[in-house]
Image: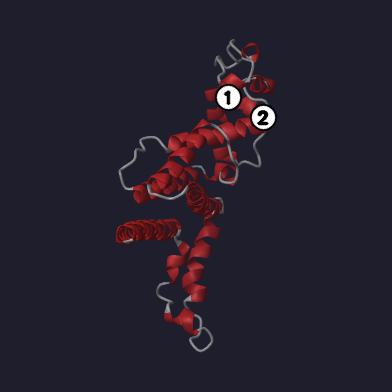
Amino acid sequence: MTESERVPAERKRRRPTSSGVVLSADLIVDAARDLIDSQGAQAFTVRKLGAALGADPSAVYRYFRNTEDLLLALADRLIGESMAGFGPSGDWGADLRELGLRAYRSALRHPQIAAFSTIRVTGRPHEQRVVDTGVGLLLGAGFDEATAVRHYHALVDTALGHAALDAGVLRLAPAQRAADEQAWQDRYGSLPADEYPNLHRVREQLPLMAASAVERALDLLVAAMRREAVDRGAAESGATEREAADRVAGEGAERAG
């Protein structure tokens, strides 16, 4: 059910606002996105949203029951946008990795919104479609129902966890980000070998710590899932072969008897 379907039709505004715009659920979500992108989630208020729309703030409640309803609709909108153009490639592991990266990249495009979108469940159509797609890929790979859900959970939380972390970095002031990045070279790379032998040994690689680890994390996770799928297939094949051998042996025993 869409936002507009959840609010009674008679409550929706059909007259233009003072700025000459006819409100809609989509227009309100757009304005909320732009406000949070520019000012941050903590500074967002319906009063500011009304001003941006050129409408009385109460007009928002003709389309959304409350602020949370609006923010969850916004989060679901971004999920839908992140999935534009996605289609199964036939490689379930590559498709799962792509789902994770799409979720991550969507959050990084809107780091202020990621402060809440990465930790909430929207329960809305776009999110439902993504979860259905991800679980379906794992079921198609041969995992049982419980394992498919657990593996999808691990995948999406890995992607969103990195998204929340890296979006938080983007919310820092540029000078803070630069100082943190430089610290891996200046503060860690110069540590004495006698006290920090391991850090000294890898000192030239330490600047890698300033980059996002999301792709490496997803690669490791998907690789582990692939190995498990192969092991499960081998185990099931072995069990089938044993059952067939036992059946043949039993039939032979019956004939001999």
The Cα–Cα distance between marks 2 and 1, rounded to whole angstroms, is: 17 Å
Residue at numbered disc 2: 46
Left or right of residue 229: residue 112: right
Taking 231 as reference, is 38 above or below it?
Answer: above
Mark in front: 2 vs 1: 1
Q: Secondary structure at mark 2?
A: helix
- Crowding near pointer 2: few (<14 within 10 Å), some, many (20+)? some
Residue at (54, 53) in percent of width and height: 161
Image position of 210 with respect to 150: above or below: below
Amino acid type of the residue tagged 1 in the rendering: Glu
Image coordinates of residue 238 in percent, x first then y, are 35, 60
Sequence-first tag of 2 and 1: 1
Residue kind at label 2, given as amino acid type: Val
Residue that numbered label 1 is attached to: 3
Residue 196 position within the rendered picture, expressed as x and y whole percent measured from the top left: 52, 83
Residue 78 shows in the view: no
Contact (Cβ within 8 Å) of mark 2 with mark 1: no
Report the label total: 2
> In the rendered view, does 62 fall on the left or right side of 246?
right
Q: Nearer the viewer, residue 233 or 112?
A: 233
- What colour scheme was applied to this rendering of the protein? secondary structure
Which quadrant is the N terminus positioned in?
top right
Q: Furthest residue to the front?
A: 257
> Where residue 178 appears, x then y in whole percent?
50, 61
Give x and y (percent) for residue 187.
Answer: 52, 74
- Residue 59 seen in render: yes
